[in-house]
Amino acid sequence: MDRLGPGPIRPRLVAGVDVAYAEGSDRVAAGVVVLDTATLDVVEQATAQGVATFPYVPGLFAFREIPVLVEALNRLESVPELLLCDGHGLAHPRRFGLACHLGLLTGIPSAGVAKTPFVGRYDPAALGSGRGAQADLVDDGETVGRALRTQDGVKPVYVSVGHGIDLDTACRHVLALAPSYRLPETTRRADRLSRDTLLGRSPRR
DNA sequence: GCGACAG
DNA sequence: ATCTTGTCGC
């Protein structure tokens, strides 16, 4: 009997999470934005600020972002059906990147959407140039994620499973959430929210 | 040993 | 991640 399904097929609420860093100080700010997948409208937002307690070390990235991100996530009133993180999930040296941590910690299905590859390679020739083109990311013989082109002629994003969702389903949602730009709206919104919060600006829309 | 290395 | 000038294209 399948105890592990494909994950959320038609999620209504998807959340994007991101963290912004100050240059001179060690201040950090997290932003979580919940979108309605039907309209891509913002349903809810939550933020948290703090101090970076862990340095940026490739491979240990999650330990740097998790504290402030979890704080922001705990302030959420709604319960998103999917969490999209800025970074990798399974596509990690130890097969456990940020998206895996956040999914397990919150119990919410999650996936990672990274702007640059970390581990794993794909055949550029196997990736079409149009929106929707995909090519598996393979590392040490295993498929750890997928390069996904979200816009015609634009660099692909790198999607990998976090928790409670399969790769195909994750890619479908990422593509649907990126109708106009390379990055999904969840990521773009969370990025702006975290930055505005860090800089003390009034959140833009 | 050397280079590479999510954000 | 953040900084940062000009440049290309719709």
Image (tube, coloured by chain):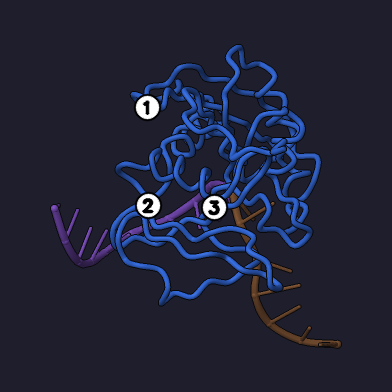
Chain colours: A blue, B brown, C purple
Identified by mark 1, the residue type is: Leu
Disc 1 versus disc 3: distance between alpha carbons?
20 Å
Q: Is residue A181 left or right of residue A71?
A: left
Quarter of the image with the N terminus of chain A is top right
Q: Secondary structure at mark 3?
A: strand
Residue A198, x across and y down, in percent? 57, 31
Q: Residue at x 66, y 35 (%)?
A: A28
Q: Secondary structure at mark 1?
A: loop
Judging from the image, mark 1 belongs to the subunit labelled: A
Which residue is tagged 3? A159
Residue A126, x across and y down, in percent? 42, 73
View extreme (top): residue: A77
Q: Residue at x 50, y 33 (%)?
A: A9
Q: Is residue A116 left or right of residue A59?
A: left
Choose the circle earlier in sequence order: 2 or 1: 1
Which residue is tagged 1? A40
Q: Residues within 10 Å of mark 3 (few under 14, many from 20)?
A: many
Q: Residues within 10 Å of mark 2 (few under 14, many from 20)?
A: many
- Same chain for mark 2 and mark 3? The answer is yes
Q: Is residue A74 left or right of residue A14?
A: right
Marker disc for residue A150:
2
Q: Quadrant of residue A85?
A: top right
Residue A76 in the image: above or below residue A49:
above
Q: Quadrant of residue A178?
A: top left
Disc 2 versus disc 1: distance between alpha carbons?
16 Å
Choose the circle earlier in sequence order: 2 or 3: 2
Q: Marks 1 and 3: CB-CB under 8 Å?
A: no
